[in-house]
Amino acid sequence: MTRRNFVTASLAAAGLSRAQGKRPLNVLYVVSDDLSPTALGCYGHPLVQSPNVDSLARTGTRFERTYCQYALCAPSRASFLTGLRPDTTRVLRNGPDFREFIPNAVTLPQLFKNNGYQAIREGKMFHMGVPTTVGTDQWQDAASWTHNGSPQGKEHKSRGEARDLTPDISQGRSMYSVATPDESEQADFDAANKAIAHIEKHRGEPFFLGLGFVRPHVPMVAPAKFFDMYPCANRRHP
């Protein structure tokens, strides 16, 4: 199944449900920043422990032939959220808003919104500078959402044991990590809890919920217990 067929089938199923007088299907759309599928257990990685994603893979549809359109955040996200190639959106670097070039484009969440759905965002869905603009609405395309939420996070300023393996490289690109004792300080923790609250609030009506996690994008900020799952002797380095 291709991604286009998957989206088409989802919208068709929602339309059929309405035509039959049934409650339309809801959509939870999860995006994780800079995560390669090869770094997941469900795609065969021998060391990574990803039980929750693996469980979803076992009970859902796992795509084995999907490709990154462009190896940068803004171009890639503008592409998969509009269905247009980067040379069409003209977003070829991090920073420009795709609306500058294609102001009338209808994004995936906007399509659901235009068809009577609550279109809800929590976290990074379109481009967001990590860590510099985490917690802001910059680049998040207000036209796509009925709720446009950007959870806060302390990022590299979090309390905990910090390491910087590349001190000469700027934040957002350097191999900087923080093992923190308090996960509640992180944007992803806040985004997940707010997403759960939205599901509870809107469970009786159709919704498209975009949940965007900023990890594992650097700086690598996570509770210490997750770093402890991978003893140094087992860690692989390029």
Image (cartoon, rainbow, N blue to C red):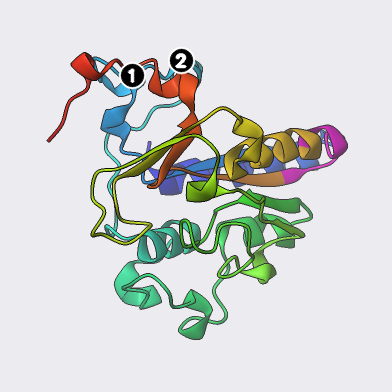
Instruction: Tell me the element at label 1.
Output: helix
Query: Residue drawn at (63%, 56%), measured in percent from left and top?
Result: 109
Task: Pinpoint residue 24: horizontal percent, then vertical percent.
Answer: 76, 39
Is 205 situated left or right of 61 in this image? right
Specify the segment rendered in magenta. Answer: 199-207
Is 149 situated left or right of 101 in this image? right
11 vs 58: above or below: below
For residue 41, the mark is 1
Q: Distance between the residues labelled 1 and 2?
A: 8 Å
For marks 1 and 2, the one nearer the N-term is 1
Q: Report the residue that reaches farthest toward the left.
A: 238
Magenta stretch holds residue 205: yes
Q: Label 2 amino acid?
A: Pro
Q: Mark 2 points at which residue?
A: 51
99 vs 55: above or below: below
For residue 99, the mark is none
